Image (cartoon, rainbow, N blue to C red):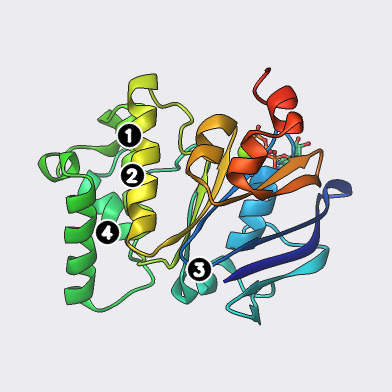
Amino acid sequence: MLQVRDVRISYGKVPAVHGVSLTVEAGTIAAVVGANGAGKSTVLRAIAGLNRIDAGSIELDGRPIHGLPAHRRVPLGMSLVPEGRHLFPRLTVRRNLELGAFTRSDKGEIRESLEMVLETFPFLREREQQLAGTLSGGEQQMLAIGRGLMSRPRLLLLDEPSWGVAPMLVARIFETIQAINRTGVAVLLVEQNVQRALSIAHRATVIQTGRVVAEGNAADLLGSELVRKAYLGL
Ligand SMILES: Nc1ncnc2c1ncn2[C@@H]1O[C@H](COP(=O)(O)OP(=O)(O)OP(=O)(O)O)[C@@H](O)[C@H]1O
Ligand SMILES: [Mg+2]
């Protein structure tokens, strides 16, 4: 479904990603793991259209999309839940969700999506009129994922969904990601929580300083010496 081929990305003159390739098969969870500053967010933002690529290609359903602006990639079926969530803290929960549907116009269909999101995250229903900024970190993360779902993506791009989430809610976030995937939505998951990410992913890519150092079946990688030594401290 998504094919990233040998992308290079820089910030000004400073290169950050030196040729990364990865694929996401329809209906699967793919993880990208790596240490701080490895380039995970840079790659994810390039897929969403928020970073320009210097070289390489990004294809969705076999069609190149790297020339399109971010807002034209959303209706093609991808949605980014950014690192740090970027909610509108002074707007209500309901309004934050509605903004996730900004590329859509059919009111009836938007209402259906809202209902689906409120079924996925029932606590949001009671909080619809509450300001987003008053939710806990974990609740805000679920709201951000809910907002991402409001564009009805076939591919959900998640950047550090466990960031700033209380330990007791982290497991629930990962369970929800699996539940969303079971409805047929493909997920590209960027995480520093390597153990959890590899536990729910089908395939995974490990990046170090802007380069792919390992790729394969997520369960195999979780058991590999590279991952156990470099990321799990085992
Ligand atoms: N806006 C920016 N301007 C300049 N350099 C940047 C910018 N954003 C990221 N970088 C640099 O690009 C490299 C990759 O950063 P990136 O944020 O993609 O890493 P990451 O793997 O997502 O890290 P983290 O786990 O901390 O989120 C780093 O060297 C970082 O300092
Ligand atoms: Mg990051």
Q: Which residue is drawn at 41% across and 66% down?
A: 153
On the picture, is 93 further left or further right than 206? left
**Residue 221 screen position, x and y as percent:** 66, 40
- Closer to the camera, 203 or 48? 203
Which element type, helix, strand or loop, lies under badge 2? helix
Precedes in sequence: disc 2 or disc 3: 3
State yes or no: discs 1 and 2 in contact (Cβ < 8 Å). yes
Q: Residues within 10 Å of mark 2 (few under 14, many from 20)?
A: some
State the separation of the CA atoms marked 2 and 3: 18 Å
Disc 1 to disc 4, C-alpha distance: 24 Å
- Of the image marks 3 and 1, the number of the one nearer the N terminus: 3
> Cα distance, mark 4 to mark 2?
20 Å
Please name the residue shown 45% across and 26% down the image.
164
Question: Which residue is pictured at 30% across the width and 34% down the height?
Answer: 139
Q: Position of residue 187 (x, y in %)?
A: 49, 56
Secondary structure of residue under mark 4: helix
Does residue 97 sit above or below 90 in this rendering?
Answer: below
Numbered mark located on residue 94 in the image: none
What amino acid is labelled 3 in the image? Ala
User: Residue 188 placed where, x, y %?
Assistant: 54, 54
The residue labelled by disc 3 is 26
Gap in angstroms between the C-alphas marked 3 and 1: 24 Å
Residue that badge 4 annotates: 98
| Residue 222 visible here | yes
Q: Residue beneath label 2, please?
A: 176
Q: What element carries label 1?
A: helix
Q: Nearer the viewer, mark 3 or mark 4?
A: 3
Classify mark 1: residues with Cα within 10 Å, few (<14), some (14-19) or many (20+).
some
Q: Please determine whether, in this image, residue 97 is positioned above or below residue 49.
A: above
Left-right relation of 27 to 70: left
Q: Which quadrant of the figure contains the N terminus?
A: bottom right
